[in-house]
Image (cartoon, rainbow, N blue to C red):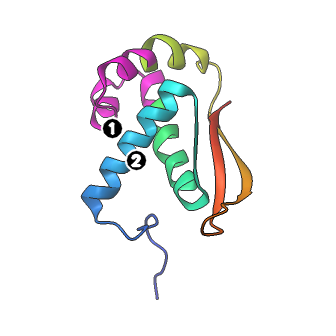
Amino acid sequence: MTRNLGARKLSRTGSHRRAMFSNMASSLLLHEKVETTLPKAKELRKVVERVIADAKNERRVEVRRVIKDKAVYQKVFEVIAPRYKERDGGFTRILKLGARRGDATEVALVKLV
């Protein structure tokens, strides 16, 4: 029996998930850190790692599929990709911040290394 193929669904439709991670990735790349729940942080890491790797290899179309904002798109190619040119992977770091007061959900900070 095959299990656990793919990513977390996070109680959202596929289009909602794609839009949410596109927006979160744009925020992370623009501000270089973002605070979110731990499951979302772990999924966001996969998206951002791929975007930075594609930017390093000058795959502009693949980056454009995720990053819709023009300012963030330019920042990825002009600032972020050259910064990680010598690094093979591991562009993000997840720091656990503890439980959120309202609903006790585990919260994490995702930041660029």
The amino acid beneath tag 1 is: Val
Q: Could you tell me how far apart the alpha carbons at marks 1 and 2 are, in whole angstroms?
A: 8 Å
Label placed on residue 21: 2
**Numbered disc in front, either 1 or 2:** 2
Per the image, the residue denoted by label 1 is: 66
Residue 69 appears at what percent x and percent y?
31, 26
Task: Residue at 25% x, 57% y: name it.
Answer: 15
Residue 103 appears at what percent x and percent y?
60, 69
The amino acid beneath tag 2 is: Phe
Q: Nearer the viewer, residue 23 or 93?
A: 23
Q: Do the residues labelled 1 and 2 touch (CB within 8 Å)?
A: yes
Task: Residue at 36% x, 17% y: name it.
Answer: 71
> Dividing the picture into quarters, in which one does residue 26 lie?
top left
Q: What stretch is highlighted in magenta?
A: 53-75
Label placed on residue 95: none
Task: Residue at 62% x, 66% y: name it.
Answer: 105
